[in-house]
Image: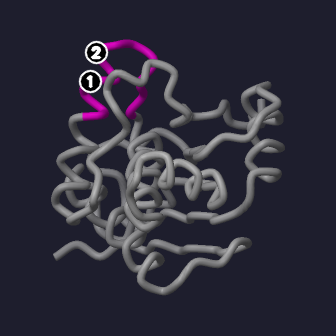
Amino acid sequence: MRSYQVTIQQKVKVNQSVITGIRTAVTETLRFEHVRAKSSVTILLTDDLQLQELNLAYRGIDKATDVLSFPVGDVMPGMEDDLQLGDIAISVPYAERQAYEGQHGLKSELQLLAVHGTLHLLGYDHMEPEEKLQMWGVQASILAQVGAEITGPPLEAEDSDLSSNPPQPSSE
């Protein structure tokens, strides 16, 4: 069985069962994608203001969003163990609103956002229709595996708030 390190930092607190659900969702995503053991992901549960600041700094968009992913680098098969995949920032208040609007629980919404963010760390994107179908299909499979109440955002939602990878700061 593969072992992954999922670190969850809470600027905005959620209960332990939600934390467990998020950790399970990330772990199952990494297993589903056959990521090597000992890989790690860090998740920050924060507020709208911090997501807005990050969204502006890295994407040039001055508004809050639900999730942003910050990959460390390209993930390639056969890479060494102990690989830091990247960081994910999630706005808990934003997720609460989406859960309310979607008539499902916060835990399931946060699981969706965690899976979504992890898939971005692994190189998935949804800018093109084919990419979106593939990513949404993988999300649905993983969320069904973990028993989430939802399996993804509505496919008809063309302007989903699920955010893409922001550009990374460059040392060049």
For the point 37% across and 65% down, the residue is: 81
One can see residue 90 in this view: yes
> According to the image, label 1 marks what residue?
133
**Pointer 1 with pointer 2, Cβ within 8 A:** yes
Element class at badge 1: helix
Is the N terminus in the top left, top right, bottom left or bottom right quadrant?
Answer: bottom left
Q: Main secondary structure of the magenta part?
A: helix
For the point 52% across and 48% down, the residue is: 98
Seen in the picture, residue 163 relative to 97 is either above or below; the reply is above
Q: Nearer the viewer, residue 72 or 67?
A: 67
User: x and y percent of residue 25 in the render?
Assistant: 33, 64
Residue 111 horizontal side relative to residue 61, left or right: left
Residue 14 horizontal side relative to residue 158, left or right: right
- Image-quadrant location for residue 76: top left
User: x and y percent of residue 139 in the render?
Assistant: 28, 44
Tell me which segment is drawn in magenta: 124-136
Element class at badge 2: helix
One can see residue 34 in this view: no
User: x and y percent of residue 135 in the render?
Assistant: 30, 33
Give, as a three-letter code, the residue at label 1.
Answer: Leu
Disc 1 residue crowd, few under 14, some 14–19, many 20+, Cα 10 Å: some
For the point 50% across and 29% down, the residue is: 160
The residues tagged by marks 1 and 2 sit, at their Cα atoms, a distance apart of 5 Å
Residue 144 horizontal side relative to residue 159, left or right: left
> According to the image, label 2 marks what residue?
130
For the point 66% across and 58% down, the residue is: 93
Disc 2 residue crowd, few under 14, some 14–19, many 20+, Cα 10 Å: few
Is residue 94 magenta-colored?
Answer: no
